Amino acid sequence: MNYINQLDLAGKRVLIRVDFNVPLDEEGNITDDNRIRAALPTINYALDEDAKVIVASHMGRPKGKREEKYSMAPVARRLGRLLKKEVIAAPDCIGPEVEELVRSMKPGQVMMLENLRFHKGETNNDPEFGKALAALCDVYVDDAFAVAHRDNASVVSVVRFAKESVAGFTMKKELDYFRRAMIDPARPLAAVLGGAKAMTKLPALENLMEHADKIIIGGAMANTFLMSVGIDVGKSLYEPELVPVANVLLKNAKAAGVKMYIPVDCVVADRYDRKAETKLVTVQDVPHEWMIMDIGPATSTLYREALRDCKTIIWNGPMGAFEMDAFSRGTYNMVSTVAQTYALTIIGGGDTDVAVSNAGESENISYISTGGGAFLALLTGEVLPAVEALGGYTGLENGGHSAQ
């Protein structure tokens, strides 16, 4: 797989697919521009090489029709402020009007295309939509790791028609860190998995058993594992159909010599509410009418000790309902633990990223992934359609070949 710094971009039309699906408040103001900032190295490189830069992204889920609340106009304004130059806001992402605007661009100028998902062809991976996007450029650059796991036209079909297609620096950094963590890691390698649903994480967990030395389970998905060893979790959220699967995974981990950790104590509440009555109990003493909302202090200590000697740590998913203060201690304790280790630390997943940011520990994490779904797909061992389209491999599929 080739990268943007391997091509001559001078005077060329360079279409950069980014992930600018940023959060907005009710007034349409951007509340977090980290995704925009993450793409600046790639955009600035193209500008420094005297290219005509065309930026493309999606926003929200407009389902193939124009919705003004999902317009890229606010993003174009923010990008302009960050680049300290005017960013032309295109009225659409394809079509004669856009093509004319591109023809009139001069080297060093930047244009932001309108929301790709205003067209059904984007999510349908329509070759004609991909062809129309490719017609706008001489060079296509994929820097949108967050959608690399999606079979969308702007990351797959467009590559078939573009004259030259390469990856950007964000994509390169994501894959490089993933390889350092999973292909040839410094050991011990620990994987920390949390979040609400075991269903979304079990494939990753199964794959991680072939790579990790330790696996730590938290969040509501831990309840399914507790049930699998005969511990009643009361009214806690868990997935009954996955209880037997969780039990098999625990047994397989033991047979493979992988140390798996599940909670030993927890914070419980009488209802899912920030004003609920709470108490601290061992996992064996969860009241029948109560629900587990967070891991307890003994579990946090256990997990901290488990991670103390690790040289590589991958973390995806919070330890509890951290959005409520009463149930946030477990997640923030994990943030502190991971941040204070002397390990290569990689974090993926929107909720986990938020927790790290809220705790002010972002600078103490080696790498925070820009894509939750794509990050999880990598952990599962899936082939990412966007990476495959560019001719690269993630490193875990096809016999373990690394991306070139």
Image (cartoon, grey):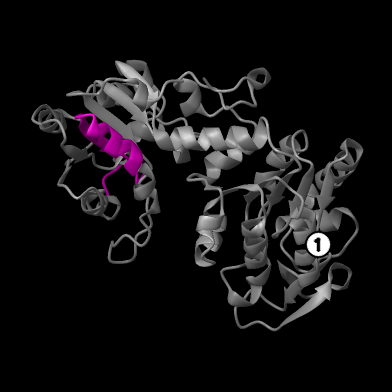
The percent coordinates of residue 106 (x first, y second) are 11, 31
The amino acid sitting under disc 1 is Leu
Compared with 393, 84 (above or below) is below
At x 66%, y 34%, the residue is: 182
Using residue 5 as the reference point, say whether residue 280 is left or right of it. right
User: Would residue 337 be seen by someone viewing this image from the given angle?
Assistant: yes
Q: Residue at x 76, y 71 (%)?
A: 297
Q: Return the x and y of residue 342 as percentages of the image width and height.
A: 66, 52
Q: What residue sits 54% from the left and 61% below the top?
A: 361
Stretch in magenta: 40-67
The image quadrant of residue 41 is top left
Nearest the viewer among 247 and 336 is: 336
Which residue is more in the foreground, 350 or 199? Answer: 350
| Number of numbered tags placed on the structure image | 1
Kind of element beneath mark 1 = helix
Where 79 falls versus 144 (above or below)? below
Please give the name of the residue rendered at 69% of the width and 51% of the height, measured from the top-left corner: 193
Residue 311 in the image: state x and y as whole percent.
70, 45
Pointer 1: residues within 10 angstroms few (<14), some, or many (20+)?
some
Q: Is residue 391 above or below residue 379?
A: above
Residue corresponding to mark 1: 302
Quarter occupied by residue 312 = top right
Residue 144: tell me if it is visible. Answer: no
